[in-house]
Image (tube, rainbow, N blue to C red):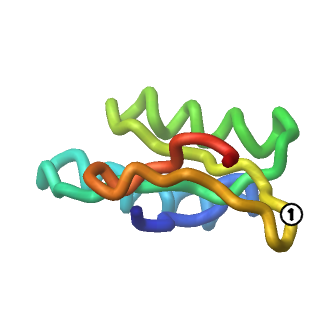
Amino acid sequence: SNAIGLPAAGPHAYNDVLALAEEIAREKMKVYPYCAARTVESDIVPIVEISQKTGLRIQVPGYLEAGETIKVDTRECRFVSRA
């Protein structure tokens, strides 16, 4: 997985994340991008917009508590569930 930013942090951050997502999609890179976000609409909407503009699947991991265990698919490098 590759963190590509927090697009809700402002216009510059949004444009940077969009540019990274466009490059990943255009070059058909074998990476699994994700963005940081809180569980509020104002953080999620920019990620959805970028995903729709680029056709790129962007993961948004939920916040985890310290010491919380999760399951990860190591073949696809993606979050599966909380354990």
Q: Which residue occupies the extreme bottom position in the image?
A: 66
Decide if residue 23 is in sight here.
Answer: no
Q: Residue at image x 82%, y 39%?
A: 42
User: Is the residue 46 above or below the residue 17 in the image?
Assistant: above
Number of numbered discs present?
A: 1
Judge whether 40 appears above or below 21 on screen.
above
Q: Classify mark 1: helix, strand or loop.
A: loop
Q: Residue at x 48, y 53 (%)?
A: 72
Among the 4 quarters of the image, the one containing residue 67: bottom right
Q: Quadrant of residue 43?
A: top right
The x and y percentages for residue 75 are: 26, 53
Task: Specify the farthest residue to the left.
Answer: 27
Quadrant location, the N terminus: bottom left
Q: Position of residue 8 (x, y in %)?
A: 73, 53
**Drawn side of residue 24 relative to residue 28, left or right:** right
Question: Is residue 73 toward the left or the right of residue 59 in the image?
Answer: left
- Foreground pick, 66 / 29: 66
Crowding at dot 1, Cα within 10 Å, few <14 / some 14-19 / many 20+, comes out as: few
Rendered view: 83 above or below 69: above
Instruction: Work out whether residue 4 or residue 8 is closer to the camera in this orientation and state it.
Output: 4
Inspect the image, locate mark 1, and give the three-letter code of the amino acid beneath it: Glu
Q: Where is residue 32 drawn, in percent x and y?
A: 35, 53
| Residue at image mark 1 | 65
Asked whether, in this view, residue 75 is left or right of residue 33, the answer is: left
Q: Residue at x 83, y 33 (%)?
A: 41
Residue 75 visible in rendering: yes
Residue plotted at (52% across, 58% down)? 15
